[in-house]
């Protein structure tokens, strides 16, 4: 497919594209290769010869194809896009790319955190949400997550957190999963992780699609305006398609059926021209209000409830182009929250401060030296001009004999912006007068109030899912002591939560925090546990993902039409056009690939079958009328499609002649998610229920009272 949506960044990429069409195969030195099948040998049956430079050229490169995967966030998928600033926020920031009407090319990389590069997309995990804006003032990276808080407060703990969640060092198990002893050992000793753990055990960690997740900058940053005045800012990405999840059992099955489920979904959406979009929102906090809240805005384990500081939309991002080459772009892109453009600055969040060092450092290692900035995907669109030179893989060719500053021989160039009265990046002139301490602010010591806020803001179904997730994860660990220690933390958050999880584990939640947990917390706060301040709000709507029937959108949702030979084309077309009018996609699934014959005559080419597809990979289901109903009644795979769809609370519709099939399935109660043509307006009712995403009430049987 011809790639469109060009911009200055794409021009840079295009300058490096290699097109092999009509070209002879050559060595790396451009020598044409006569025979690419046989090594050079001493006689047809003899040993290979050392002089075979053509073989060596090929193999020596192959032997070096792999680079170290990212130490975290190794599994990722990316796309190019554009950001358009839509609001005037010049009072707060002088960043030119945020000036109303400005369009800036960007590259976004989504990722999971714990799994290796080839691990499943559907792991229960945080998702990385990294955006590199190629601005006219240089690259700006907003390297965030789909969860607005973090596990730890200080960068010093990061390697420990990562070691705890990654596969265990002796047997390298489990892959891409937090459900093991070392993770729960660590977090149960670190009560500051309680808030983030709640998010990680919620459906936020199981996105339906990368296109249906929120993104957050997590830390508080600073905007700086022309006059040098600072304003604290939190960044939010709000997806236009809404925020949606899959069920846990589904996630596990999708991992088997299609471990690339999220990557494929993003790629296909962009190829089809269904460009995903997010609004960029900001929460702005005047410097004077820095200490105003019941929590510390520098503490990365806290969010600022939208009820107390609303999110203002300042622009829209559209992903509109897939990469040409995964390695060159998605793998070699080097994100670094430690590099800024004028108008944006760090806050003193100790986690953010620590990140400033780690990212450039890891790129230097991962990408093999200091010239990773010259890789096409990392090059700024406004050019880089400085006196840095040489090093592995250097590509730029510096002209002349000057590579120092100040100089006169080079006409003083590259010149200093300030010497010409121009502006460049200037750090916010924040006044700091303090003693050096290796310690933590007391204002960081409340670990449970916001974990409670999160839990108590969830819908009943979401609470149930959190309880199930804790029960699953804690059941998987071997140590009873760790189970109890974590239950004690849950008990500090919400007693019913702890009780429900405790019941599933056969344990009574301890009333008090474990003495080991307290001992470690005292390391940071000698008078721990502290009395928490009264929170501004005790629930926040923005924290729940629940959509009610009829409220959401079904755009780009995949609806499986379950068919076989003899199916009615009329019955298909009626539903198909209604769904397509709402932006959803109808996918015909039959028993064989190739020709499908319609009841009315005529055929259609089938690409997907019960053999290749799985119920868990679709959003909703429709069984049309026709003679196909007779064969589907004896098709176990069809029945499994319906049963799993029912189990995962999805909308299932039946044309009139197909309704009898229900008797063969596990559907017992015809709840609002089972839509029958004989009972109303089939497509309208189906779409209405699909808009609610899932019929979670179907899970009532497993419901736990909270
Ligand atoms: Fe990262 N993180 N991180 N992190 N992080 C990396 O950089 C690190 C943190 C995040 O798509 C690494 O290039 C430290 C918070 C994303 O390429 C590494 C600390 C948040 C990505 C690193 C944190 C993130 C990374 C590994 C604590 C959310 C993927 C490879 C101080 C705001 C970027 C790499 C991509 C990647 C270090 C904490 C998000 C090692 C030391 C908080 C989305 O440099």
Image (spheres, rainbow, N blue to C red):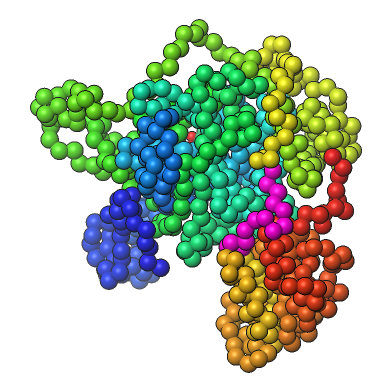
Magenta span: helix, strand or loop, mainly?
Answer: loop
Q: Magenta segment, which residues?
A: 544-557
- Asked which quadrant contains residue 345, the reply is top left
Q: In which quadrant will I find the C terminus?
A: top right
State left or right for residue 378 relative to residue 284.
left
What residue occupies the far left of the structure in this picture?
409
Does 387 sit above or below residue 576?
Answer: above
In-front residue for pair 85/344: 85
Q: Is residue 163 visible?
A: no
Does 595 sit above or below residue 306?
Answer: below
Does 423 sit above or below residue 54?
Answer: above
In-front residue for pair 678/587: 678
Determine the residue positioned at 56% across, 37% down.
Answer: 311
Determine the residue positioned at 35% across, 65% down.
Answer: 39
In-front residue for pair 416/73: 416
What residue occupies the far bottom of the structure in this picture?
601
Residue 51 location, x and y as percent?
28, 57
Does 424 sit above or below residue 524?
Answer: below
Determine the residue positioned at 69% across, 36% down.
Answer: 540
Residue 21 location, x and y as percent?
30, 69
Residue 219 location, x and y as percent?
54, 30
State left or right for residue 164 relative to residue 70.
right
State left or right for residue 390 relative to residue 495.
left
State left or right for residue 375 relative to residue 432.
left
Determine the residue positioned at 69% across, 75% down.
Answer: 562
Residue 220 location, x and y as percent?
53, 28
Question: Is residue 343 covered in magenta?
Answer: no
């Amino acid at each position: 497919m011809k790639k469109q949506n060009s911009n200055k960044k794409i021009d840079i990429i295009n300058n490096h594209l290699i097109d092999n069409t009509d070209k002879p195969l050559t060595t790396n030195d451009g020598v044409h290769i006569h025979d690419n099948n046989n090594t050079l040998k001493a006689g047809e049956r003899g040993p290979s010869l050392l002089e075979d430079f053509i073989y060596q050229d090929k193999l020596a490169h192959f032997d070096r194809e792999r680079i170290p995967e990212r130490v975290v966030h190794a599994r990722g998928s990316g796309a190019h896009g554009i950001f358009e600033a839509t609001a005037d926020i010049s009072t707060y920031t002088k960043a030119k790319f945020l000036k109303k009407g400005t369009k800036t090319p960007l590259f976004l990389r989504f990722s999971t955190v714990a799994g290796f590069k080839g691990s499943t997309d559907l792991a229960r995990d945080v998702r990385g949400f990294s955006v590199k804006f190629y601005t006219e003032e240089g690259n700006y990276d907003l390297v965030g997550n789909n969860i607005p808080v973090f596990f730890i407060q200080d960068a010093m703990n990061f390697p420990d957190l990562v070691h705890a969640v990654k596969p265990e060092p002796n047997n390298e198990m489990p892959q891409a999963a937090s459900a093991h002893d070392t993770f729960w050992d660590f977090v149960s000793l670190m009560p500051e992780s309680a808030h983030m753990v709640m998010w990680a055990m919620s459906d936020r960690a199981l996105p339906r699609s990368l296109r249906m997740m929120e993104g957050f900058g997590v830390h508080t940053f600073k905007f700086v305006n022309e006059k040098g005045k600072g304003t604290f800012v939190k960044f939010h990405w709000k997806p236009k398609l809404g925020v949606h999840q899959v069920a846990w059992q589904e996630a596990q099955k999708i991992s088997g059926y299609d471990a690339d489920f999220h990557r494929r979904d993003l790629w296909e959406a962009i190829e089809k021209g269904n460009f995903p979009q997010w609004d960029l929102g900001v929460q702005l906090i005047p410097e004077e209000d820095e200490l105003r809240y019941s929590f510390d805005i520098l503490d990365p384990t806290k969010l600022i409830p939208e009820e107390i500081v609303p999110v203002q939309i300042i622009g829209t991002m559209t992903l509109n182009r897939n990469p040409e080459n995964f390695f060159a772009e998605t793998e070699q892109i080097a994100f670094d929250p430690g590099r800024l453009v004028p108008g944006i600055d760090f806050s003193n969040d100790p986690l953010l401060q620590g990140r400033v060092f780690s990212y450039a450092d890891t790129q230097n290692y991962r990408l093999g030296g200091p010239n990773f900035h010259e890789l096409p995907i990392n090059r700024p669109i406004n050019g880089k001009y400085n006196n840095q030179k040489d090093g592995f893989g250097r590509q730029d060719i510096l002209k002349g004999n000057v590579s120092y500053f100040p100089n006169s021989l080079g006409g003083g160039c590259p010149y200093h912006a300030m010497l010409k009265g121009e502006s460049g990046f200037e750090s916010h002139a924040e006044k700091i007068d303090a003693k050096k301490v290796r310690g933590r602010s007391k204002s960081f010591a409340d670990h449970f109030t916001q974990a409670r806020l999160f839990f108590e803001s969830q819908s009943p179904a979401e609470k149930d899912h959190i309880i199930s997730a804790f029960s699953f994860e804690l059941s998987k660990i071997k140590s009873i002591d760790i189970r109890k220690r974590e239950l004690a933390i849950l008990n500090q958050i919400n007693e019913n939560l702890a009780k429900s999880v405790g019941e599933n584990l056969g344990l009574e939640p301890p009333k008090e925090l474990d003495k080991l947990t307290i001992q470690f917390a005292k390391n940071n706060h000698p008078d721990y546990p502290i009395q928490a301040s009264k929170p501004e709000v005790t629930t926040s709507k923005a924290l729940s993902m629940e959509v009610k029937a009829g409220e959401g959108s079904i755009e780009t949702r995949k609806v499986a039409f379950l068919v076989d030979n003899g199916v009615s084309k009329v019955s298909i077309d009626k539903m198909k056009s209604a769904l397509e009018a709402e932006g959803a996609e109808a996918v015909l699934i039959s028993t064989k690939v190739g020709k499908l014959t319609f009841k009315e005559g005529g055929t259609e080419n089938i690409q997907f079958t019960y053999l290749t597809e799985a119920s868990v990979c679709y959003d909703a289901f429709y069984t049309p009328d026709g003679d196909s109903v007779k064969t589907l009644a004896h098709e176990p795979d069809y029945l499994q499609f319906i049963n799993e769809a029912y189990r995962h609370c999805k909308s299932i519709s039946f044309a009139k002649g197909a309704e009898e099939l229900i008797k063969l399935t596990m559907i017992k109660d015809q709840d609002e998610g089972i839509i029958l043509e004989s009972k109303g307006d089939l497509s309208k009712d189906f779409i209405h229920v699909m808009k609610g995403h899932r019929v979670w009430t179907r899970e009532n049987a497993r419901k736990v009272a909270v």
